[in-house]
Image (cartoon, rainbow, N blue to C red):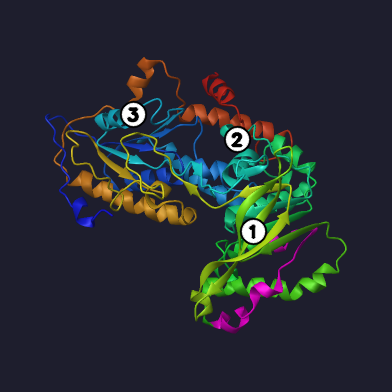
Amino acid sequence: MLKTNIFKRVVTFRCYTTSKWLPRVCVVGAGPAGFYAAMHLVKHLQSVQIDIIEKLPVPFGLVRYGVAPDHPEVKNVINQFSKLANNKSINFIGNIALGKDIDLITLRQHYDAVLLTYGAEEDRHLGIENECAANVIAARNFVGWYNGHPQHKDLEVDLSGETAAIIGQGNVALDIARILLSPIDLLKKTDITENSLQAISQSNIKELYLIGRRGPLQVAFTIKELREQLKLNGCRTIWRENDFIGIADIISSLPRPRKRLTELMLKSLNEQNENQQNMTHTKSFYPIFFRSPNKFLVNDNGHVSGIELTCNTLEGDKLENQKCVATSQKEILSCDLVFRSIGYKSVQADKTLKLNPNGSVINDNGRVLDDEDGDLGKLYVAGWLSTSPVGVIVNTMGNAFQVAKNICSDLQNSNCTQVKDGIQSMLKSSGKQFVDWQGWEKIDQYEVTQGAKQGKPREKVTSIKKMLEISAST
């Protein structure tokens, strides 16, 4: 493990001209972390020029492609980001991928500071038998599919079976459950893609299991998402009473957020016998605890047919501090579809980056160590790329603001006067088509217009080729 003191160094910029210096910053990744960092830089630096580079032709990252379609209020932050993007100090450069269209050394040659905020692009794996079986699907891919991400638009999802399971108990897992179990009329009013809407409207899924290896006190989902799930029309929630033994006795000692969430689970558990008598329910949601997937079962066609689960137990004196331990007992859960929702990890977009085992870039408060930087711009990292994928948008905002604060301090304390030119002229001479903010606004207007024809907020363009055609249109 690296010691913190190796990061303690004086940040200097070696420059050789006396012309007026306008600090130029490159932000790689146009998601929440990138926009929030840019917002702080514009607000706290007297003058700055910021280029926001994004590998897709369109901005907003996980706000556009990760937030559930039925959560439009979470996407309101796009209004703030759009206002910022119209600031004369900001340039959006879409359809430019780090490590493919441009490398990190080149960026650092053209900017005084480079901030990486490209997030976590890969799904974590369980590493168990038959994980690649048909219809074992990464949560990130499925979310991208119903949200219109170009990379996942052609995902093959077989919804013909009646039983599905989700491995993991975070908010993404509950998003998937809610999308699959919601009345189709509710989804029709959202910006879910038409292709996904049609597929889900023909789904035969009637039962969905939410599987967690630990107990009710360790669930990662929040109270808002659980409350929405419990209120779904036509869907009943069925808990296992044995999973909650002893929980009521310690609930008063829990921290307030955990206490409120646990109280809601207990309330639902106590009401479920009454709810089960409601014959209007056509779908069922089963949260089950203390189970870990041991292997996936497959049929003769290579299609998943079930999960062999290892039964776990808790050990320790205090219930809230007990550890989860696997036993020798196994259970079989028959199912036709499985989603793996156990978290994301970042990728090494550029070969010069050093990543921790959890996928985050090695850094100290956002500053990336580089002993031989020469005259290159300083390197920083923010968002999930710096912390690993944890928290929600408000956590990302706090992290981005803090890293941007460090960038401001470093730039203001530098003695640099050398003027750097950014990469736009270089991109133009290379012939690589990139999308500026005006190009994105054309795509945005096109999507809104197409959505209005179907009574939706927007119908997302899922083809990169089509995006580039629209952005270049007159």
**Left or right: where does residue 460 sit relative to residue 117?**
right
Task: Give x and y (percent) for residue 291.
Answer: 62, 62
In the image, 272 versus 317, the foreground residue is 317
Asked which secondary structure carries label 1, the reply is strand
- Split into 4 quadrants, where in the image is the N terminus? bottom left
Q: Residue at x 42, y 43 (%)?
A: 35
Mark 3: few/some/many CA within 10 Å (<14, 14-19, 20+)? some
Relative to 229, residue 110 above or below: above
Q: Position of residue 306 (x, y in %)?
A: 71, 51
* Label 1 sits on residue: 309
Front-most of 390 and 432? 390
SS under mark 3: loop
Where the C terminus falls, by quadrant?
A: top right
What residue type is disc 3 on?
A: Asp
Name the residue at 35% across, 15% down. Answer: 429
Image quadrant in which you'd find residue 459: top right
Query: What amino acid is found at the position of numbered circle 2 in the picture?
Result: His
Q: Which residues are magenta?
A: 229-252
Rendering quarter of residue 267: bottom right
In the displayed structure, would residue 250 be above or below residue 345?
A: below
Of the image marks 3 and 2, the number of the one nearer the N terminus: 3
Q: Is residue 345 magenta?
A: no
Question: Which residue bears the numbered disc 3?
Answer: 103
Rendered residue at 77%/49% (across/down): 205
Q: Which residue is mark 2?
A: 152
The x, y position of residue 422, in whole percent, is 30, 28
- Specify the farthest residue to the right: 279
